[in-house]
Amino acid sequence: MGARKASLIRPYLELVRLPAVFTAPADVLCGAVLVAGGTPSWSIAGAVVSSACIYCAGMAANDVFDAEVDARERPKRPLPSGRVSRRQAWTLILALQVIAVLVALSLGMNAAFAAAATIAATYTYNASLKSTWAGPLAMGACRYLNALLGMVAVSDRSPWDLPGTVLCVPLFTLTFVAALTTVSRFEAHGGELRRLRLALGAMVLCAALPAAAIWSSVFTTVLKEPVFGVATLLPVVFVGRAAISAVKTGAASDIRGAVMAGIFAIAMVNGVFAAAAGAWPVALLIVALLVPGRVVGKWFYAT
């Protein structure tokens, strides 16, 4: 009976990209730290739950909108394989999104609006912009709004009332995610090496850009520990190793490895920012979330 239940649940866990879900709290936690420091609160916990639901729903919606493409390129995925129907997928998506908004609403109207805006951004990406030049920026915007959810949840302030320097910090994550999304466009079939190298190079460069923010005097009000700029080498090394392998071969499997490394590096970048803001415990928590993500990634795909 246990094995049967596991076989019924597994397609849904694949649909929501379970390993990557552990990176979703990174944006929220970093955003909360930038506004309110590292003090634990129910507001942060609620924002994390809301964010995780939004992320899972967005990943599932991505498969719904890509069902025809996946039928040709990834026939073993839950929808094209018939293990999950479109109706079941939409039921899961809408249920998760309702939970996300209700949890955010319990934290205040500003948090509810941030959650709703993030959900809207996922639909904008999945339904219309994914295949366009603006697709990577749209995905980056989803991560930015995720950080904004953390900011407004702990402060109950509208985005317009937050300091400009605070609002600018997640732009570095947005840029990195945009570069990562560009690389992910090559993962199904590989790609022309020149374009692939440019995309991978941009991703590695964007992983290093947070150092500029941490050392810049512009951000001293929120990033008070510039010594942690050195820690930005960690995501660069993590992403760089995978990128080198992908550049050498141009093989789809190596590109998927680089994308996977990039997904987990999102948490590393956010962890570095949290440490630079003086919230060491939160920074450690963000990086620690990579452990279950990596473990679960042995049994489930994340890209």
Image: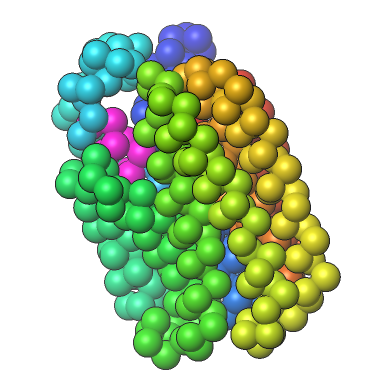
Query: Would you place residue 39 above or below residue 255 in this image?
Result: below
Kindly identify the residue that appears in the image at 33 percent across and 60 percent down: 118
Kindly identify the residue that appears in the image at 67 percent across and 39 percent down: 240
Left or right placement of residue 249 versus residue 240 in this view: left
Residue situated in front as seen by the camera: 259 or 279: 259
**Is residue 51 inside the magenta stretch?**
no
Kindly identify the residue that appears in the image at 33 percent across and 43 percent down: 57
Q: Does residue 187 show up?
A: no
Q: Position of residue 203 (x, y in %)?
A: 54, 46
Which residue sits furthest right? 227
Q: Position of residue 8 (x, y in %)?
A: 38, 17
Query: Would you place residue 136 above or below residue 192 in this image?
Result: below
Which residue sits furthest front? 194
- Residue stretch rendered in magenta on the structure: 57-64
Q: Position of residue 221 (x, y in %)?
A: 66, 87
Query: Would you place residue 225 above or below residue 24 in this image?
Result: below
Left or right placement of residue 90 versus residue 27 in this view: left
Kindly identify the residue that appears in the image at 32 percent across and 77 percent down: 109
Question: Which quadrant of the figure has residue 108?
Answer: bottom left
- Locate the C terminus by quadrant: top left
Q: Does residue 115 show up?
A: yes
Majority secondary structure of magenta residues: helix
